[in-house]
Image (tube, rainbow, N blue to C red):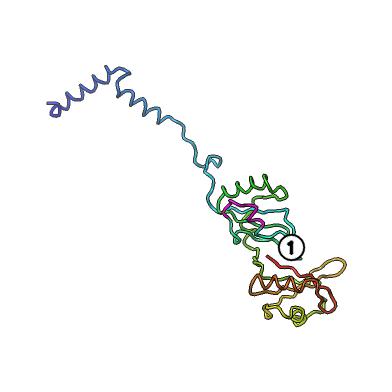
């Protein structure tokens, strides 16, 4: 019988292999395996062949003014799945906004933002950035007011009198001085419980006077 005669079985397989035509399945199957084995392998380390990253991507937006709000950027980049927590204002030492950092949920969102800006926001420019540029930036969230133009001898008590009638954190008034030409600029950061209270201080106190100096009031975001 077939399964009882291994020597005969081997002879029959040899004859089949020698007499098989190209149209028969076995040689074709062998050639198929050979072709697949010889196919060149593409290196998975090639960065041009990798799918776009789905991790966080950071960008730096330039071209903003001191009047540009984080909500303006959200409206500009509609469709990029951003929230207010994904946008930070980059202030210089004098608290003038020099740009905005944006945290995108993916590279797809970043690429979409580039297209949106090219289409309807040509005043702005978006460049790739690093997380090390994002992390140190502080978010004031519209609850911190900057007072500029204070006299050099101004004390926290003078700031409190200037802000009389407003609700603010009097225990955390930060007085600083920045070098400027021709004279140094005396400033104060004052923290408010809410955005509405900070905005109320801006409306009621901007261009007011502290020790005979006119004070510029700004809300930081």
- Of all residues, the one furthest to the right in this rendering is 182
Above or below: residue 46 compared with residue 15:
below
Above or below: residue 34 compared with residue 215:
above
Q: Is residue 129 magenta?
A: no
Residue at position x 74%, y 65% in the image: 95
Above or below: residue 210 compared with residue 46:
below
Spot occupied by residue 84 in the image (x, y as percentages of width and height): 61, 61
Spot occupied by residue 24 in the image (x, y as percentages of width and height): 29, 20
Spot occupied by residue 63 in the image (x, y as percentages of width and height): 73, 53
- Quadrant for residue 204, please give it: bottom right
Query: With 40 as the anchor, is 113 left or right in this view?
Result: right
**Part of the protein shown in magenta:** 72-81
Secondary structure state at the residue bearing disc 1: loop
- In front: 134, or 2? 134
Number of numbered discs visible in the structure rendering: 1
| Quadrant location, the N terminus | top left
Query: With 160 as the anchor, is 10 left or right in this view?
Result: left
- Quadrant for residue 64, please give it: bottom right
Q: Which residue is mark 1?
A: 92
Q: Is residue 80 magenta?
A: yes
Label 1 environment density (alpha carbons within 10 Å; few <14, some 14–19, many ≥20):
few
| Quadrant location, the C terminus | bottom right
- Quadrant for residue 176, please give it: bottom right
Residue at position x 40%, y 27% in the image: 35
Spot occupied by residue 113 in the image (x, y as percentages of width and height): 62, 49
- In front: 36, or 152? 152
Residue at position x 55%, y 51% in the image: 106
């Amino acid at each position: 019988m077939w399964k009882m005669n291994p020597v005969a079985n081997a002879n029959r397989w040899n004859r089949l292999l020698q007499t098989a035509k190209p149209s028969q399945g076995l040689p074709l199957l062998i050639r198929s395996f050979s072709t697949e084995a010889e196919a060149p392998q593409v290196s998975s380390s090639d960065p041009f062949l990798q799918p776009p990253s789905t991790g966080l991507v950071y960008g730096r937006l330039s071209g903003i003014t001191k009047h540009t709000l984080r909500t303006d950027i959200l409206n500009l980049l509609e469709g990029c799945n951003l929230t207010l927590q994904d946008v930070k204002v980059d202030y210089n030492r004098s608290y003038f906004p020099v740009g905005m950092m944006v945290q995108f949920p993916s590279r797809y969102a970043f690429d979409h933002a580039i297209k949106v800006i090219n289409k309807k926001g040509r005043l702005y420019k978006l460049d790739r950035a690093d997380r090390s540029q994002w992390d140190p930036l502080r978010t004031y969230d519209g609850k911190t007011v900057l007072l500029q133009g204070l006299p050099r001898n101004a004390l926290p008590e003078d700031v409190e009198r200037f802000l009389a009638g407003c609700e603010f954190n009097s225990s955390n008034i930060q007085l600083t001085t920045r070098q400027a030409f021709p004279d140094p600029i005396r400033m104060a950061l004052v923290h408010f419980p809410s955005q509405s209270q900070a905005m109320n201080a801006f409306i009621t106190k901007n261009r007011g006077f502290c020790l005979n100096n006119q004070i510029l009031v700004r809300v930081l975001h």
